[in-house]
Image (cartoon, rainbow, N blue to C red):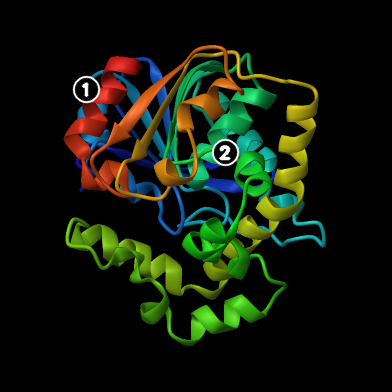
Amino acid sequence: MFDGFETLDVDAGEVRIHLRRAGSGPPLLLLHGYPQTHVMWHAVAPTLAEDFTVVLPDLRGYGASDKPPTTPDHWPYTKRAMARDHVAVMRALGFDRFAVCGHDRGARVGYRLALDHPERVERLAVIDIVPTGEALLRADREFSVGYWHWFFLARPAPLPERLIAADPDAYYTHFDPPFFDPEAVAAYRRHGADPAGIHAMCEDYRAAMTLDYAHDLADRSRQRRIACPVLALWGGRWHLEDWYDVLAIWREWGDDVTGRALDCGHYVAEERPEETLAELRAFF
């Protein structure tokens, strides 16, 4: 699936980050979403590696990366902590400045990286999200039904962990659609059945509802903005477009924002790899 990619474990200071790397052009960091791993980029990363040095990590708590112990405030699983991981990873690989593309949770890490470390990020692509603070501030009945897992996973431990671990296959219906590659699904399910992975993913959502939300509100109140160009892509057949004026929201956070909906659901890079690839190559 990743022929020609090098596999590495990089010491990011607080955690060890597992990743794949290929290519020799300008550096491009690709960050995956929930409940996946870096494997979600399998359909676009090899072609991107023809033009870029592509770096595909597993976020902390996901895949083969470290899953650090949590704290009562969930700090180890904040997007601020994850963003810091990837500054360290890219520096260790020899890159002080780089482009970033993230999907879902990875996009949340990506925009936090651009806000906290503007000197590091040249360009940012976010796929199928609006900022966490915006989503929660605007949450209503439709949001709570459509994104029920945000609230379920954020419940105090160990309730969601126990319920998921009791029957992971029944829970991970995310991967039932036929567009998913069977090899990718096998990787996602291995990770999703690991008790440490289940707990870490719940901590990711607990952090989102607490410190991530607070960090976004603090930036919003200070009118802190993303300085680099931003590309926002989203699935036109998923929820985001029903709930938000996606570009209008991102333009409240960034000075140079473009983007559009693609004719697909949430898993944009796997549902529409050719269109995703075309958008990313043109932007980066």
Asked if one can make out residue 32 in the rendered structure from this viewpoint, the answer is no
Along the line of sight, the residue nearer the viewer: 217 or 111: 217
Q: What residue type is disc 2 on?
A: Val
State yes or no: discs 2 and 1 in contact (Cβ < 8 Å): no
Taking 274 as reference, is 63 left or right?
Answer: right
Along the line of sight, the residue nearer the viewer: 50 or 171: 171
Question: Label 1: how many residues lie within 10 Å, few (<14), some (14-19) or many (20+)?
Answer: few
Q: Is residue 131 above or below residue 16?
A: above
Which of the 4 image quadrants contains residue 156?
bottom right
Taking 103 as reference, is 153 left or right?
Answer: right
Q: Given this view, does label 2 or label 1 mark the residue nearer the observer? A: 2
Taking 130 as reference, is 157 left or right?
Answer: right
For disc 2, the marked residue is: 109
Total residue callouts? 2
Q: Name the residue at 55% across, 29% down.
A: 249
Q: Name the residue at 71% across, 51% down.
A: 76
Q: Name the residue at 51% across, 79% down.
A: 164
Q: Secondary structure at mark 2?
A: helix
* Mark 2 → mark 1, Cα distance in angstroms: 25 Å
Along the line of sight, the residue nearer the viewer: 62 or 202: 202
Q: What residue type is disc 1 on?
A: Glu
Q: Secondary structure at mark 1?
A: loop
Residue 225 x %, y %: 66, 19
For disc 1, the marked residue is: 50
Residue 194 x %, y %: 48, 73
Q: Name the residue at 46% across, 55% down.
A: 34
